[in-house]
Amino acid sequence: MKRDGKKIIFEKAGDLPPMAMSLGTTEYNETGSWRNERPVVDSSKCTGCGICWKFCPDISIKEDANGKASIDYFFCKGCGICAVECPVKAIEMKEEEK
Amino acid sequence: MIYTIPQKELINPGHLACQGCGGALALRTVLKTLGENTILTFPACCWSVIDGPFPYSAVKVPLFHTAFETAAVTAAGVKAGVKKAQDPNTISVAWAGDGGTFDIGIQALSGAAERNEDMFYFVYDNEAYMNTGVQRSSATPKGAWTTTTPTQSPKKERKKDLVSIIAAHAVPYIATACVAYPEDLTKKLEKAKKIKGFKFFHIFAPCPPGWKINPQDTIRIAKMAVENKMFPLFEIEDGEKYTINMPNPKKEKNVPVNEYILKQGRFRHLKEDDINEIQAFVDKRWEKLKKLAEI
């Protein structure tokens, strides 16, 4: 069994039968439209501790160029875990505007 | 940013979990440590929906959707398959919810544990059949509301002590973990990866819609459950060596269950006597666990 990027290559008959051949294919699924409150990071307060990143169920928190948290609004469902768990209260939930 | 758990993501964003899902967070943390060389088996559970409809898949490792009762036996079969294909390093993982483990999958789970198959079995415990709309399971705690145990007659039976049932099989490694303590979970997984044989993980994963909590409180509630000993963190090696690993042993004090109970809509109908009864049960179980850990 070999991997080439996202694809798995089965070489001989003794290999496993093919299951889901393309892996990780939900990256065009915009779950950000579910949101009714958006988290906003105050970069001057953010210490880059990584706690929000660690607890995000939607993998929507990325590190920006300065080592601070930044939010990917394409995927963020707006659960608000990051705002509650932030030890320095650098993330604020703001009502989503149409 | 400071990374206290492995940085590489093996789950794509864009998955279909509810806001603040504990189960999605649990698999994200587990796959980070297990790595790319993993094959997952999902029975019917929340994750069979979260993953997305065919041919889409949120998980970046191969996975197998199987029938409700066969998670453990299918994962054992996958392990036999990779062994035959001369790929012994691939990890086979059964990833089931509490319904597929405590109730429906227990026969296959017991069989795999008894044969000591070289695999991981994870149960992410959200304490009811959440995927089908909050029906009671044998993991639902006493006094909780579900759609099949309405507030007029909440669940009368206790939560099944599954960890003790698996411990009776004397499997090499059993651990309980919680989504609010990912460092503890990754540490236990690193340890378990080195062990050959059946590894069982019981992961506490709150469910905001089913427990009637706000999605932002998932981690807070999960932390409370560990601190007040509703869900103590411990490991069992070879079915007899108990090790308790609470997150802050120095700060450990007797945290009452009240706050945890009152924060959740599913317990809102409980009276003070009912809460005292739950407290007494939690205390008794904690004393029992402490005794076991000292042996």
Image: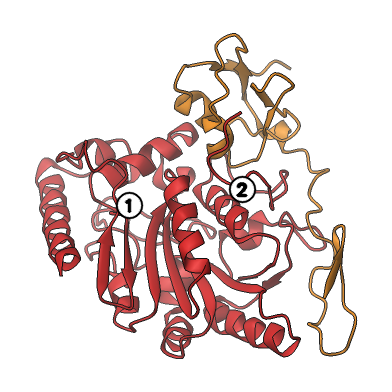
Secondary element type, mark 2: loop
Count of picture labels: 2
Q: Which chain is red?
A: B
- Horizontal relation, residue B228 to residue A15: left or right: left
User: Residue A87 appears at what percent x and percent y?
Assistant: 44, 22
Taking the view exactly as shown, the residue that stands out farthest to the front is B194
In this view of the protein, which residue sits in the foreground, B78 or B292? Answer: B292
| Amino acid type of the residue that numbered disc 1 sits on in the rendered structure | Trp
> What number is the disc on residue B145?
1
| Amino acid type of the residue that numbered disc 2 sits on in the rendered structure | Ala
Which of marks 1 and 2 precedes in the sequence?
Answer: 2
> Would you place residue B292 above or below residue B287 in this image?
below
In the picture, which quadrant includes the N terminus of chain B?
Answer: top right
For the point 30% across and 77% down, the residue is B239
Q: Chain of mark 1?
A: B
- Horizontal relation, residue B118 to residue B229: left or right: right
User: Residue B90 appears at what percent x and percent y?
Assistant: 67, 74
In the picture, which quadrant includes the C terminus of chain B?
Answer: bottom left
Q: Which residue is mark 2?
A: B17
- Image quadrant where residue B173 sits: bottom left
The colour chain A appears in is orange
